[in-house]
Image: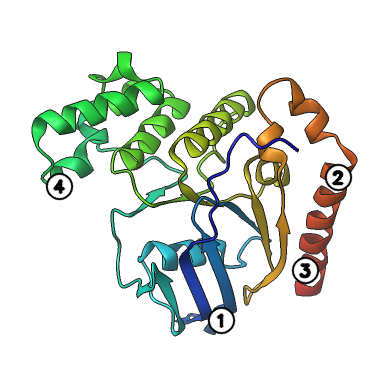
Amino acid sequence: MQRAYDGINGKTVVKLEDVELVYNSEIGTVTALAQVNLDIQEGEFICVMGPSGCGKSTLLNIIAGFMQPTDGQALMNGRPIEGPDWQRGVVFQSPPLYPWLTIKENVNFGLRMRNIPEKEREAITAEYLEIVGLTDFANRKPYELSGGMKQRASLAKVLVNEPGMILMDEPFGALDALTRDKMQALIRRIWMKNQSTVFFITHDVDEALSLATKVIVMSSRPGRIVKVLDTDFTYDMDGANSESARYSKQYMTMRESILNVINQKDELAV
């Protein structure tokens, strides 16, 4: 298969070593994650799947630095992840836009917090507003935008900082099917162009297979990685090959394999 992207170079960006997370709740002690080991290489597009409550978002929050594991360690470039950092940009399902700021002001907010000079800040902001197709809406407020446009603004808000890693927690889950397809194509193009490393949570197996270079499937709580699949379908999802790639025998076999793992774990949890 001819690849349109060759950014994966074997360098480990994030390393998870025996990561566990245990917390106390009203029902007692809960083990959210158990013995999670994972190496994320520079340039990979990883999609994470699993039944609800399996710890996907918890794992993302640990990588983002929002949470600390109760055992094991999470490292980025060989150093412990001890808190949030602009080098790890996070895109949530609900766009965290400030309603009193314009779209341009929202997008360049992180640059202002980092004290990037105004002239440079304006140029970078303009570039990414153009990339996500919001140049004509730069001076609008968030309430004037559709859901898909807000999510594009949220994506630009992360991209302007040019983070080494982009973390996405079901970012397209609330969008209609047509807008979702457009957003998938957009993030795929940005990933290929910028050679970013992406960690993307989804419940949609077709979304995972069409975006990812690697699909990780997690078990029901306590969350463990139970299956890892390498996939190259993303390289054929733009243009004339998209339909043949999605309905190929290899694609359908991998799709069934992922669903079987998830469904089996769901049945065991009941």
Marks 4 and 3 close (CB-CB < 8 Å): no
Q: Which residue is mark 1?
A: 31
The answer to which of marks 4 and 3 sits earlier in the sequence is: 4
Q: Which residue is found at the position 68% from the left and 45% from the top?
A: 204
Res 48 quadrant in image: bottom right
Marks 2 and 3 close (CB-CB < 8 Å): no
Where disc 3 sits, the SS reads helix
Q: Nearer the viewer, mark 2 or mark 3?
A: 2
Left or right: residue 253 compared with residue 21 = right
Closer to us: 94 or 108: 108
The answer to which of marks 1 and 3 sits earlier in the sequence is: 1
- Rendered location of residue 200, percent (x, y): 54, 50
Q: Which residue is found at the position 11% from the left and 28% from the top?
A: 119
| Amino acid identity at mark 2 | Gln
Which numbered tag is attached to residue 113?
4
Closer to us: 100 or 251: 251
The answer to which of marks 4 and 1 sits earlier in the sequence is: 1
Which numbered tag is attached to residue 251?
none
| Amino acid identity at mark 1 | Thr
Q: Which residue is found at the position 47% from the left and 43% from the top?
A: 195
CA–CA distance in space, label 1 to label 2 = 35 Å
CA–CA distance in space, label 4 to label 1 = 36 Å
CA–CA distance in space, label 4 to label 3 = 44 Å
Q: Which residue is mark 2?
A: 250
Is any atom of residue 199 visible in this view? yes
Q: Nearer the viewer, mark 2 or mark 4?
A: 2
